[in-house]
Image (cartoon, grey):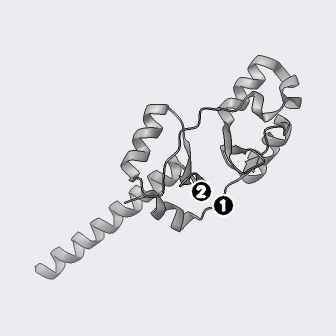
Amino acid sequence: MTVSMILKSKGSEVISVRPDDPLSSVVETLSARRIGAVLVLRGDGGVAGVLSERDVVRALARHSSAALGMPASAFMTAEVVSAGPRDSIGRVMEKMTHGRFRHLPILDEGRLVGIVSIGDVVKKRIDDAEHEAQALREYVTQAG
């Protein structure tokens, strides 16, 4: 079970912002798209960082409403951990658990091809477990 299987079912759309976008714009995007994080992309399409709801809360705690006029780059996580499409779901779960984050950009040979969230990973694990249980039920029924 690999990351590419998740991307195949959920799609590869990535919601992103620019480093100089004001935090208020990022908040609007998060709210409108009903998502928990966005990728911050440089002009060349490379990943500059990740900005999550947690980052927004920290920004508001430190700078109050003035944070809303400041650039996304001031609050994003710049040291981005990523995975590849051939990485196992287990490996992705390890990275997310160890790093204590819920969103992981997926890069294929340095090119951004998608993003997965912990929700995507859990959904895939549950779907696979349900399919396995159904296959076992059918096997037992046919063998009996």
Per the image, label 1 sits on a secondary structure element best described as: loop
Q: Residue at x 51, y 54 (%)?
A: 120
Q: Which residue is mark 2?
A: 114
Tell me: 98 left or right of 75: left
Q: Position of residue 58 (x, y in %)?
A: 70, 24
Q: Residue at x 35, y 64 (%)?
A: 130
* Quadrant of the rendered image containing residue 103: top right
**Distance Cα–Cα, label 2 vs label 1:** 6 Å
Q: Position of residue 138 (x, y in %)?
A: 23, 77
Q: Mark 2 or mark 1: which comes first in sequence? A: 1
| The C terminus, quarter of image | bottom left
| The N terminus, quarter of image | bottom left
Nearest the viewer among 55 and 86 is: 86
Nearest the viewer among 84 and 9 is: 84
Q: Are marks 2 and 1 in contact (CB under 8 Å)?
A: yes
Q: Residue furthest top?
A: 62
Tell me: 18 left or right of 7: right
Mark 2, residues whose alpha carbon is within 10 Å: few (<14), some, or many (≥20)? many
Q: Position of residue 84 (x, y in %)?
A: 48, 53
Q: Which residue is mark 1?
A: 13
